[in-house]
Image: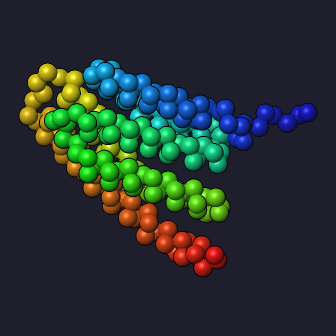
Amino acid sequence: MDAGPRTAGRFWNVPNTLTVGRLGLAVFVFLMISRGWYAWALGLFVIAALSDALDGYFARLLNQDTPLGRQLDPLIDKVIVSGAYIYLAAIPGTGVFPWMVTAIVVRELLIQGLRSLLEGQGQAFGAKMAGKLKTLFQCLSISAVLLCLSLEAPPYGLTTARDVLTWTAVGLTIYSGASYLTGAMPALRGEASRR
């Protein structure tokens, strides 16, 4: 009776609510892009990206880290980033090409599956610095693409920065994916030997 409320194991805590809210924002970002309302899409995407930093902060601050939250947070990040790139690749002149989107989506699905497998076995699969940089540059790239689309005549310097950010994001996506796979190889070999 005297024990305080246990929030760490509950789903509807502060960080998980922010994470699910980000999924709702993703739907509106995709809708705004499909309607050609790029400034609105940019604003909502920036809010979603900022909420990604906040949910991790509140999980640590309030001691509300949960196994489901650790799975859900990166999964929803992948939904909004991959979805945004898919929509943007369909728009001419964005500097986002289908092969880039394919590389990003394949990497995200592969690493998410690997995370689920290893964490399901009780093994840690935390984010590496390369993965964090990958996410940062993906968000900067998408924001730059949406900013260029929202302007009638974006300056050359802005489109150049957009393209540099996008190519850097793709490069980091491939590099970080290879890094995660290399690091997980011992665990994967151990899993294969048990079968």
- Camera-side residue of 66 and 26: 26
In the depicted structure, whether residue 88 falls above or below residue 151: below
The residue lying toward the viewer, choosing from 150 and 55, is: 150
- Toward the right, the furthest residue is 1
Vertical placement of residue 33 versus 56, above or below: above
Query: Does residue 180 appear to the left or right of 103 in the view shown?
Result: right
Quarter of the rendering occupied by the C terminus: bottom right
- Picture quadrant where residue 37 is located: top left
The N terminus sits in image quarter: top right
User: Picture coordinates of residue 21 (x, y %)?
Assistant: 53, 28
36 left or right of 194 in image = left
Q: Quadrant of residue 129?
A: bottom left
Q: Residue at x 16, y 35 (%)?
A: 93
Q: Position of residue 7 (x, y in %)?
A: 72, 36
The residue at the point 50 percent across, 45 percent down is 75
Residue, far bottom:
193
